[in-house]
Amino acid sequence: MAALNGPMRIQASSSSSSNASLASRVVLLLTALPLALAAFAFTLQWRGEITDSSSAWPSNRQTFPGIDNSPLGSSAVSTFPSVSRPHSYSSSDCVEILSRHSSASLPYHQGWNYDSDPNLRPRICVTTSTSAGLEQILPWLYYHKVIGVSNFFLFVEGAAAKPNVSAVLESIPGVKVIYRTSELEDKQAKSRVWNETWLSSFFFKPCNYELFVKQSLNMEMAIVMAREVGMDWIIHLDTDELLHPAGSHEYSLRKLLSDVPSNVDMVIFPNYESSIERDDIKDPFGEVSMFKKNYDHLPKETYFGLYKEATRGNPNYFLTYGNGKSAARIQDHLRPNGAHRWHNYMKSPNEIKLEEAAVLHYTYAKFSDLTSRRNRCGCKPTKEDVKRCFMLEFDRTAFIIASTATNQEMLQWFREHVVWSDKQLNLKLLRKGILTRIYAPMAIIRGLRDSGVFAMAIASSRSQSNRKYPSSSTQNASTSSIAEQTLRKDISLSDIATRNNSSKATARKILDTGSNQDRAVPPTSPPGLGDILVDA
């Protein structure tokens, strides 16, 4: 046995040595192979045989997205050397806002075709009545193109009707510009609206009441235009409102409405109101991310439990209206029901309210909104007279402040009643769900701005104008002609009604709608503490 043990020990020792040698070779192979592959890849890239995917994007972006947070960053126009800034806008705030960006970001929207495919369904259109400038209309318009709106019916006056603004709007695919001319007002004087009661309580009143009637008349005409171009849905929005199609995984308004059951006629978007955190906002769409949620999207206990903290001494939970906007399916006998809703002459429409989607209302987001609203209304700054002009209490108070206070007093009032500067309160209401952060619209609009879409729209309009009118004298004559045709005539809705009455031999016949629910829905405040018992 001892003699046998010797050879066995020698054989085991030999086997162990062989295994150790094999293991060392495997370790050497596993170490050397990655190093060799890395060296090979580096050699190929150094020789230019591997294409860096980042080279597909413009190389003049020197900073990583998000590093430069200045709101006065470099112009997006410089990203596209071939696009020159039109001379007529070189010194205006309009192009500064449209071209600047708050952070360097990759131009994902570069080269997109914004002329919507007519085969996509459903086809959605938006109508508005606006006197805003390009710095507000272009971001609003292209944002809604991105989320699925294909056509726009813009009833313009004021700044929006000026030739250098309207020419840009008319050059955008899917946009129809309608000017407030005498011809338009003659057509609206013959509307059946004047013979019915659902809007009659708003007739013959100034300021917001007159605007409300004008919006309704424009919506009525937009329905006809929408049918002519084959639209499926129509929505009325102001140019300080952005639709927020939450609840659709694609962040798509088209996807959201395509999922609506076919027996539903109208869809309500509850509104969220902007809650600005600074008093120097210049570009609300690009700078505001905090919003106050609608009552419809909050538990009743949360809403009423934090009502006083959420109002901060203001008359109501929201500064302005709380009843959102709605989308209507295009169908026979459709009519507006005021600026916030739609109705049908022949039936009670089936209406649903969306549980996640909303319309974001950027109200009083800029300090200049105080004076711009004041300048649009000629009422006296007294508590009695402002009731003739404004439907909501905050609008009345703001008008009086803007009409009677000094600029410094206005700014102080604005900070106390509009600006959310208390970070601890903001954090508390964010945690409770009263306030919420929404970044998608800001990201989309910043992306559009960084890609140069707005600047290119302006430049494209200018180049089209130069091709159409090659000589400066012809162009100037044409511009004067356009100005004469498009500038708003000082004709009030009362004049329209008078014209309507004088054209009829018989007295106006008032149709009985039979139900208060059929009457036009005005802008209304959200529920207050006094509504708790009524609600219960």
Image (cartoon, rainbow, N blue to C red):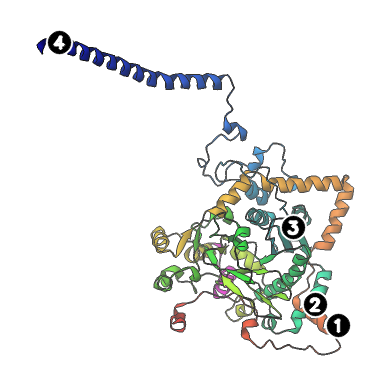
Q: Secondary structure at mark 1?
A: loop
Label 4, label 1: how far apart the Cα atoms are: 129 Å
Residue closest to the eye, 256 or 519: 256
User: Which amino acid, mark 2?
Assistant: Ala
Q: Which mark is residue 503?
A: 1
Decide: few, some or many residues near mark 1? Use Cα within 10 Å; few <14, some 14-19, many ≥20.
few
Q: Seen in the image, is 142 located left or right of residue 509?
A: left
Circles 3 and 1: CB distance less than 8 Å?
Answer: no
Comes first in the chain, label 3 or label 4? 4
Circles 4 and 2: CB distance less than 8 Å?
Answer: no
Residue 516 percent across, percent down from the top left: 62, 85
Label 3, label 1: how far apart the Cα atoms are: 33 Å
Q: Secondary structure at mark 4?
A: helix
Comes first in the chain, label 3 or label 2? 3
Q: Decide: is 281 above or below 187.
A: above
Circles 4 and 1: CB distance less than 8 Å?
Answer: no
Q: Which mark is residue 175?
A: 3
State the quadrant of the N terminus. top left
Q: Decide: is 283 above or below 344.
A: above
User: Which amino acid, mark 4?
Assistant: Gly
Dot 4 corresponds to which residue? 6
Magenta stretch in the rendered image: 392-407
Q: Name the residue at the left extreme.
A: 2
